[in-house]
């Protein structure tokens, strides 16, 4: 298993860099576009969660890509408003298929979700290490 494979993003990508790919262990049940995440550069907005963290998968281009923006994850997550709009943060554990419901009232893993995205948003692209 290539847990830390390196990948080069397309030259036109503003986030171009060589980055380390880490496998997702879970993803949301709802599709990325539900959360208003950026479509693929080809225009396809019916993307799926990539098997790699921070990436989405475009079934048209057959590529994993880093979305240009992350929709509602770009700011403080309006959890209750999101729920009213039919957005669910229920997630699925990829390996087991286990579904973990998200409780708005309990905000059970809200902190974890926010921390994960904060980490993503503040992460500096790693320098090209010459590979
Ligand atoms: Zn595409």
Image (spheres, helix red, strand yellow):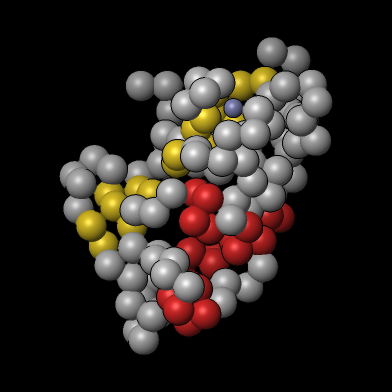
| Residue 129 in the image, given as x and y percentages of width and height | 73, 21
Looking at the image, is 40 positioned above or below residue 31? above
| Residue 95 in the image, given as x and y percentages of width and height | 24, 40
Quarter of image, res 102: bottom left
Q: How many marks?
A: 0
Residue 123 is left or right of residue 25, and the answer is right
Residue positioned most to the bottom? 105
Quadrant of ligand 1 in image: top right
Q: Residue at x 19, y 44 (%)?
A: 96
Which of these two is toward me, 23 or 129? 23
Looking at the image, is 82 positioned above or below residue 130? below
Residue 31 is left or right of residue 63, and the answer is left
Looking at the image, is 73 positioned above or below residue 60? below
Q: Residue at x 35, y 21 (%)?
A: 1
Question: Is any part of residue 20 visible from this angle?
Answer: no
Q: Residue at x 38, y 80 (%)?
A: 104
Which of these two is toward me, 10 or 128? 10
| Residue 16 in the image, given as x and y percentages of width and height | 76, 30
Quarter of image, res 94: top left
Residue 110 is left or right of residue 68, and the answer is left
| Residue 37 in the image, given as x and y percentages of width and height | 59, 51
Q: Report the quarter where the C terminus lies.
A: top right
Q: Residue at x 35, y 48 (%)?
A: 26
Question: Is any part of residue 128 visible from this angle?
Answer: yes
């Amino acid at each position: 298993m290539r847990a830390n494979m390196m990948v080069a993003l397309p030259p036109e990508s503003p986030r171009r860099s060589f980055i380390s790919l880490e496998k997702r262990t879970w993803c949301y049940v709802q599709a990325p576009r539900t959360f208003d995440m950026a479509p693929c550069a080809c225009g396809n907005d019916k993307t799926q969660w990539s098997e790699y963290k921070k990436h989405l998968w475009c079934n048209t281009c057959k590529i994993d890509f880093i979305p240009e923006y992350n929709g509602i994850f770009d700011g403080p997550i309006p959890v209750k408003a999101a729920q009213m709009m039919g957005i669910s943060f229920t997630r699925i554990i990829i390996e087991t298929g286990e579904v973990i419901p998200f409780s708005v009232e309990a905000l059970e893993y809200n902190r974890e979700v926010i921390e994960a995205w904060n980490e993503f948003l503040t992460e500096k692209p790693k320098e090209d290490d010459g590979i």
